[in-house]
């Protein structure tokens, strides 16, 4: 049965800042796959310029940009429905970001979530401070009507909307489209397995903290076995504040088994922590195994993935050139 088209144009991005993990999948990629069937067009970018906001090893970054494209395909993005491309290949992103910077006051940028998270005790670099403006440019350049985001990204989306109002007003146009956020009910926040007060992150430093989409069955089981829980007894309960480790495991179980927290808690009566962790691992393994197998095949076929990315870049470039040439006329650039 064909899916209902709800959205005009969806845009989103993922940073090639490391190996994509289960958090990226449950919080974003799984929904991107669904949204490609619910929109007239979908643009998904490997946002490599955003990755430069923190130090990157050049060799690792280059390989990661290619690998994230493989991951997007392995998760189920279909190049016939979704445009997949690296952000840095389309120079209009930075052109539009500059125009946006020239129309946006600096007030408030220092208190955006990315600065608070990534520059805790240091003076933040300008790239980190201004990255929400580049993010706004990414969205506006494709005249995206909808952007799937996590709740933590909402301040950036409010900013993007206000930039649309400012630009349309000062350039006396209706060219820029106000993007709506899509906050998916099913998009859950996955936490670090060792420090469950923090979100799972590609740049996690501790061993066994992160479940990667290319982890083997054994690696998944081992990581689950050593995941931090607590000493509140073996009875399960969902309480992210008081029991972050156990709650994170319940989130993972529910996301992959489709069971509610109450159903999981009832069905786990009498099981010890190790048995419960094994059950969570089994659900994850069952779901991740086919993704890993597709990923292995795609990694072995560099020519095929390169071809898809080249075609995606051409398509993105057409849209971006068209939009940027309209913007140039509006602002008076020759
Ligand atoms: N732990 C998470 N739980 C749920 N969703 C998550 N996302 C990231 N981590 C989790 C979502 O994945 C999408 C792509 O993320 P990103 O790579 O662009 O940026 P990020 O949020 O900074 O991801 P990481 O993994 O934490 O990377 P690093 O370590 O480089 O900062 C986004 O939609 C994000 O919400």
Image: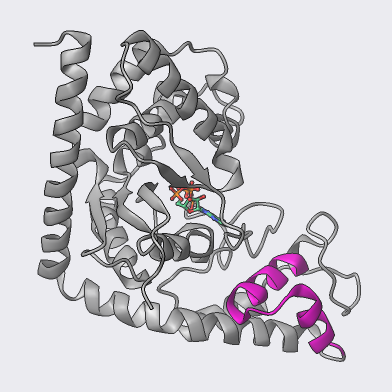
The N terminus lies in quadrant: bottom left
In front here: 106 or 180? Answer: 180
| Residue 52 location (% of width, % of height) | 34, 37
- Answer above or below: position of 265 versus 83: below
| Residue 115 location (% of width, % of height) | 54, 30
The C terminus lies in quadrant: top left
- Answer above or below: position of 253 versus 238: below
**Residue at the (76%, 74%) spot, across then down:** 261
| Residue 225 location (% of width, % of height) | 66, 80
- Answer above or below: position of 158 versus 84: above
Task: Residue lying at the far right in this picture: please name it.
Answer: 233
Q: Which residues are magenta?
A: 246-269
In front here: 3 or 302? Answer: 3
Residue 71: in magenta span: no
What sort of colour scheme is used for the picture?
one colour
The part of the image, by quadrant, that contains residue 271 is bottom right
**Residue at the (35%, 11%) spot, across then down:** 102
| Residue 173 location (% of width, % of height) | 31, 17
């Amino acid at each position: 049965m064909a899916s209902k088209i709800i959205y005009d144009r969806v845009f989103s991005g993922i940073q090639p800042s490391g190996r994509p993990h289960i958090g990226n999948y449950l919080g974003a990629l799984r929904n991107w796959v669904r949204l490609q069937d619910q929109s007239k067009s979908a643009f998904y970018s490997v946002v490599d310029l955003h990755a430069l906001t923190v130090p990157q090893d050049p060799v690792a970054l280059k390989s990661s940009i290619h690998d994230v494209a493989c991951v997007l395909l392995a998760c189920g993005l279909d190049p016939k429905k979704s445009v997949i491309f690296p952000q840095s290949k389309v120079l209009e992103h930075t052109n539009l970001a500059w125009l946006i910077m020239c129309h946006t006051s600096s007030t408030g940028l220092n208190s955006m979530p990315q600065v608070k998270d990534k520059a805790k005790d240091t003076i933040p670099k300008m790239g980190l401070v201004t990255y929400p403006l580049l993010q706004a440019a990414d969205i506006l350049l494709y005249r995206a009507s909808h952007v799937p985001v996590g709740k933590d990204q909402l301040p950036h989306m409010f900013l993007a909307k206000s930039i649309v109002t400012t630009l349309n007003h000062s350039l006396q146009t209706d060219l820029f489209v106000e993007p709506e956020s899509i906050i998916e009910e099913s998009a859950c926040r996955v936490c670090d397995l060792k420090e469950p007060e923090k979100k799972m992150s590609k740049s996690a430093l501790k061993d066994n903290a992160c479940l990667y989409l290319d982890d083997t069955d054994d690696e998944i089981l081992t990581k689950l076995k050593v995941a931090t829980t607590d000493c509140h007894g073996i009875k399960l309960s969902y309480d992210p504040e008081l029991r972050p480790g156990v709650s994170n495991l319940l989130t993972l179980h529910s996301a992959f088994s489709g069971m509610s927290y109450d159903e999981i808690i009832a069905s786990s009566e009498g099981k010890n922590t190790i048995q419960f962790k094994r059950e969570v691992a089994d659900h994850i393994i069952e779901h991740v195994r086919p993704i890993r197998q597709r990923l292995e095949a795609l990694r072995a076929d560099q020519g095929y993935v390169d071809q898809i990315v080249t075609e995606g870049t051409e398509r993105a470039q057409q849209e971006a050139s068209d939009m940027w040439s309209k913007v140039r006329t509006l602002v008076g650039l020759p």
